[in-house]
Image: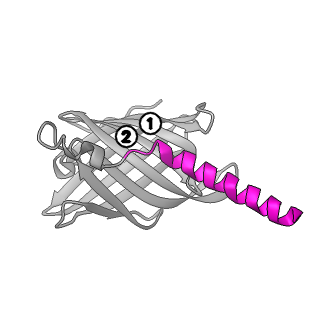
Amino acid sequence: MTLIRTWTRILVLAASLLGLSACGSASIEDYRQEAETAPIDLKQFFNGPLEAFGVVLNRQGKVERRFYVTMVGTWKDDEGVLEEWFEWDDGEKTTRTWYITKNADGSYSGKASDIIGEATGEVGGYALRWKYEMDLEVGGDTYRVTFDDWLYQIREGELINRSYIKKFGLTFGEVILAIRQTDELKNTSL
């Protein structure tokens, strides 16, 4: 009887945690009605040179890392390439190249060498929800996590990206990033 109570408590606790993590979840549907006022167009935005800067937060909201990114996007029809060069506050430099496709239904899909499988993206008005999995190294250990990115167009040429880093449906960290189009690539250090 004690074993049954213990398992029942564990299941109730797990269901409660999953329920709490889902309670505040936004949906891309929340932004679809905004399509006429400020539609986001990834082919237009991620075309040419861009720069970005941001922070990585731990689950308590403390800044763990700061970074600067230069990017160049190019498109041919509905196929895009987005090259990214990251410079971290500790001097580390990393790169990523996204291969992005605008699908016939208006959604997006993408691949990059450090991404597991395929990223998926849905547009609703001025927002894009971009989801993917990757193996994230933290303190010498590697964890498979899901990134739940929300990109919001602020005005033409400017986006805010808020990424939730999740494991088992729970948020363990966040990335907040501002991205803007530029006239030329900049080489700026933190």
How far apart are the two marked residues, 1 and 2, measured between alpha carbons?
6 Å
Q: Position of residue 4 (x, y in %)?
A: 81, 65
User: Which residue shows up at 17% across the image and 34% down it?
Assistant: 156
Viewer-side residue, 93 vs 162: 162
Kind of residue indicated by mark 1: Ile
In this rendering, position of residue 177 left or right of residue 137: left
Q: Look at the magenta stretch and give its main secondary structure.
A: helix
Q: Are marks 1 and 2 in contact (CB under 8 Å)?
A: yes
Viewer-side residue, 22 vs 135: 22
Label 2 Cα neighbours within 10 Å, binned few <14 / some 14-19 / many ≥20: many
For numbered disc 1, what is the local secondary structure?
strand
User: Which residue shows up at 31% across the image and 35% down it?
Assistant: 186
Give the total number of marks visible in the rendering.
2
Q: Position of residue 130 (x, y in %)?
A: 36, 53
Magenta-drawn stretch contains 11: yes
What segment carries the magenta color? 1-26
Q: Position of residue 136 (x, y in %)?
A: 58, 55
Residue at which label 2 appears: 161
Earlier in the chain: of badge 1 and badge 2, it is 2
Q: Is residue 11 visible?
A: yes
Q: Position of residue 64 (x, y in %)?
A: 60, 35
* The residue positioned farthest toward the front in the image shown: 1
Viewer-side residue, 83 vs 78: 78
Q: Is residue 95 above or below residue 37?
A: below
The quadrant of the rendering that contains the N terminus is bottom right
User: Which residue shows up at 35% across the image and 48% down it?
Assistant: 27
Magenta-drawn stretch contains 101: no
Label 1 Cα neighbours within 10 Å, binned few <14 / some 14-19 / many ≥20: some
Q: Is residue 106 above or below residue 124?
A: below
Q: What label sits on residue 176 in the rendered view? A: 1
For numbered disc 2, what is the local secondary structure?
strand
